[in-house]
Amino acid sequence: MTEPIFPRVREFYTKYLPHGDRLGEIFYAVWMVVVSLAILGGTGFEEGAITYVILIAFMVNITWGLIDGITVMYGGIIERRKMDGLIHDLQTTNDESSRKAGANALEKGITSILDPSDRERVLDLIVASGRGRDPQKIRYYAEREDWYYALGILIIDLLLVVPLMAPFLMIRDPETALWASRLIATTIFAILGAAYAKELNRNRWIAGLFLGTLGLSLSILAFMAGW
């Protein structure tokens, strides 16, 4: 029996995209559609304008999804090379400079709760392991997990165009459709605010109200400006 699609999607995003990255990308995706809709403030609802804006929104979000996904992906690969270089320096020189860099790296990770003396012992274990790689002898490529990360970002940016543009395809009056789209965007912004607040142990109602109000206000101002 085929596994239901939604649990598979949830598993994909849980595995390949950190929660904070997902929230941030949803915000960017929705905001870019809101900005695309602001074009209607300059063109009005004349014939063909809505179709034009829908196409623009898809093009903008696809382009951004590719740029953001690929650049962040390669940024992660560069960080991987940096870690390989740090481990290699520890295992080949193990001098004061390499140990200081290693201690800084450990202080930023899960070992931050350890005392400095305990982190020094972790560095000794790394030095003794002998399983490091010389980054100067390795050609770094994007691996499957890296491409999945980029794909996850692109999918978010692409799919979030749909609910914000759907009112223009379902509601005959364009002004009513615009307000329906704004309501959807405002709801998403409010949910994002609450989600951020939950992760930071802050007041979800205040955060949701703030981000929802901010999103609605800026969308109206952008429309009035007409971009």
Image: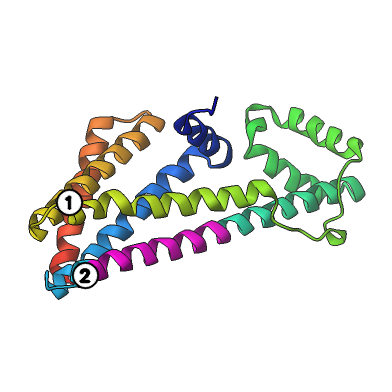
Nearer to us in this view, 196 or 126: 196
Q: Is mark 2 on a helix, strand or loop?
A: loop
The residues colored magenta run 51-71
Q: Mark 1 points at which residue?
A: 170
Alpha carbon separation for disc pair 1 and 2:
20 Å
Task: Please state if 68 lies on the left or on the right of 222 as rendered.
Answer: right
Report x, y in % for residue 167. 19, 52
Q: What element carries label 1?
A: helix
The amino acid marked with disc number 2 is: Ile
Q: Magenta segment: does it hold 45? A: no
Nearer to us in this view, 89 or 95: 89
Name the residue rendered at 69%, 38% in the picture. Answer: 106
**Would you say the magenta stretch is mainly helix, strand or loop?**
helix
The quadrant holding residue 113 is: top right
Mark 1 neighbour class, 10 Å CA radius: few under 14, some 14 to 19, many 20 or more: few
The quadrant holding residue 115 is: top right
The amino acid marked with disc number 1 is: Met
Q: Name the residue under label 2.
A: 39
Report x, y in % for residue 168. 18, 56
Above or below — where is 46 with respect to 183? below
Q: Residue furthest front?
A: 1
The quadrant holding residue 193 is: top left
Task: Please state if 142 lies on the left or on the right of 39 as rendered.
Answer: right
